[in-house]
């Protein structure tokens, strides 16, 4: 296979560097002011490019924002992928709640980018991330321990984790506040039930004179 000319390789590297500069500058603007605060003029100033360059690489502002959000979701998923959850599916949900909060606190800029949008639009990686949560909840259902319907339980898990993380990232209270564990454990207690053996043991204990 013939080697590509040095000039072509240099153009590719320059193009990738330009894309990276645009993405980095746009991410910072999104984190600071949300999608509504992302000014193309300010983005050009920060990235050292012209509007046609941005449109050439990303198409339009909406596509640029979607690309950044997708990248952030990919990094979020990668941060969890190398860690092994507990084997028990209920404990795995508790673990996932803690990891979600942990990631948001460790990456507040990324977390703001994920959810400071003009309108809810699910990107491919965002949908895959939510589906991963749905599968974790489905694993609880497969054991017969899920109380509400799968869809409602999945949304409840996300509502609880996102609500707590958003408040922590905004600085309303600290991560070691007892309220965090109360929300997490209250959620788990509400949407799950003990395994059959534990329920039988409780009934037997309650029936003793």
Image: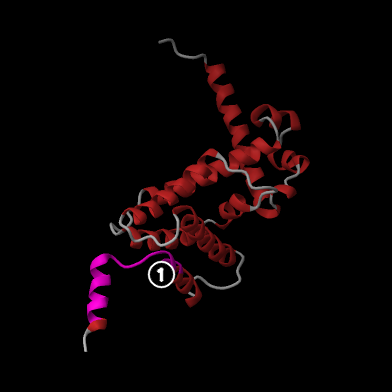
Asked which secondary structure carries label 1, the reply is: helix
Left or right of 147? Residue 170 is right
Q: Position of residue 45 (x, y in %)?
A: 75, 41
State the quadrant of the C terminus. bottom left
Q: What residue sits 47% from the left and 42% below the top? A: 128
Left or right of 160? Residue 145 is left
- Residue picked out by circle 1: 189
Closer to us: 86 or 40:
86
Closer to us: 173 or 182:
182
Q: Which residues are magenta?
A: 187-205
Left or right of 5? Residue 84 is left
Disc 1 packing (10 Å; few <14; some 14–19; many ≥20)? few
Q: How is the image coloured?
A: secondary structure
Q: What residue sits 57% from the left and 54% below the top? A: 111
State the quadrant of the N terminus. top left
Q: Position of residue 103 (x, y in %)?
A: 48, 57
Q: Position of residue 119 (x, y in %)?
A: 68, 47
């Amino acid at each position: 296979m013939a080697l590509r000319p040095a000039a072509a390789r240099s153009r590719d590297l320059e193009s990738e560097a330009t894309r990276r500069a645009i993405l980095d500058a746009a991410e910072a603007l999104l984190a600071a002011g949300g999608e509504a605060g992302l000014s193309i003029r300010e983005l050009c100033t920060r990235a050292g490019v012209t509007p046609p360059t941005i449109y050439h690489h990303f198409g339009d502002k909406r596509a640029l924002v979607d690309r950044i959000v997708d990248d952030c979701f990919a990094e979020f998923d990668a941060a969890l992928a190398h860690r092994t959850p507990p084997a028990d599916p209920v404990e795995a949900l508790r673990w996932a709640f803690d990891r979600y909060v942990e990631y948001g606190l460790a990456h507040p800029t990324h977390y703001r980018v994920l959810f400071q949008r003009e309108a809810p639009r699910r990107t491919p990686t965002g949908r895959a991330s939510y589906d991963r949560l749905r599968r974790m909840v489905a694993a609880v259902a497969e054991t017969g321990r899920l109380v509400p319907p799968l869809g409602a339980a999945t949304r409840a898990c996300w509502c609880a984790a996102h609500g707590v993380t958003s408040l922590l990232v905004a600085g309303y209270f600290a991560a070691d506040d007892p309220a965090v564990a109360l929300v997490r454990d209250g959620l788990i207690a509400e949407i799950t039930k003990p395994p059959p053996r534990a329920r039988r043991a409780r009934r037997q204990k309650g029936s003793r004179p």
